[in-house]
Image (spheres, helix red, strand yellow):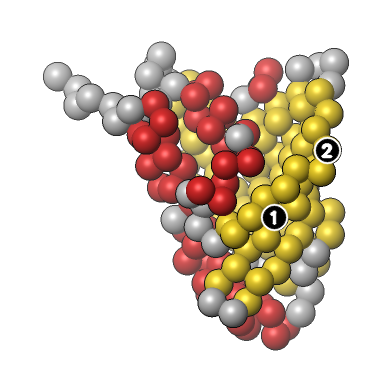
Amino acid sequence: MPRFSSKRRVRHAAQQMFDLVADVERYPEFVPLCHSLKIRQRTPKDDGTEVVIADMTVSFKLVRESFTSKVTLDRPNMKILVEYLRGPFSNLENRWTFEAKSETDCDVGFFLSYEFKSRMLALLMGSMFDAAFSRFAAAFEKRADQIYGKPQAST
């Protein structure tokens, strides 16, 4: 099963990066392969978390696939967990962590593992998915620079 994991130090606050990743409605604007995203349900919980059920459509050339996932936004612990519900995968797991290093810097952790149900789809989209996922963290960092401003160089 393909896996991708990264940890990047970014020059934005942990809360800002959490908010950016939690804003799933905006993914089609900047996330590689994300063609569209629709929120089915959003449920705030008493423990400070929020659960979002979303449909995402990814596309590459002539291939377009949609899947549904449950996204748990755990603001108190600065974590986001994405659990696969239905679609072309037999397994999909995605986790984000946000660890403050200062008021203006944080470490963003990203983990993804996936497996397609169809061997043909795995052949068609597998290497393209690998390439796109390796660019995910950079896409979010670039988006943070656009939204929050590019950090100034340290003096």
The quarter of the picture where the C terminus appears is top left
Q: Residue at x 59, y 79 (%)?
A: 62
Q: Are marks 1 and 2 in contact (CB under 8 Å)?
A: no
Q: Position of residue 90 (x, y in %)?
A: 80, 67
Q: Position of residue 11 (x, y in %)?
A: 35, 28
Residue 56, labelled with which disc? Answer: 1
Residue on which the image places disc 2:
41
- Quarter of the image holding residue 23? top right
Query: Could you say which is closer to the camera, residue 58 or residue 8?
Result: 58
> In what element is the residue under mark 2?
strand
Q: Amino acid at mark 2?
A: Gln
Pick whichever of labels 1 and 2 is earlier in the sequence: 2
In the displayed structure image, the side of residue 17 where residue 35 appears, left or right? right
Name the amino acid type tagged 1: Met
Q: Is residue 138 left or right of residue 115?
A: left
Identify which residue is drawn at 50% across, 30% down.
17
Quadrant (top left, top right, bottom left, bottom right) of the N terminus:
bottom right
Residue 110, image x, y percentages: 55, 44
Q: Position of residue 83 (x, y in %)?
A: 77, 48
Seen at 73% across and 71% down, the residue is 116
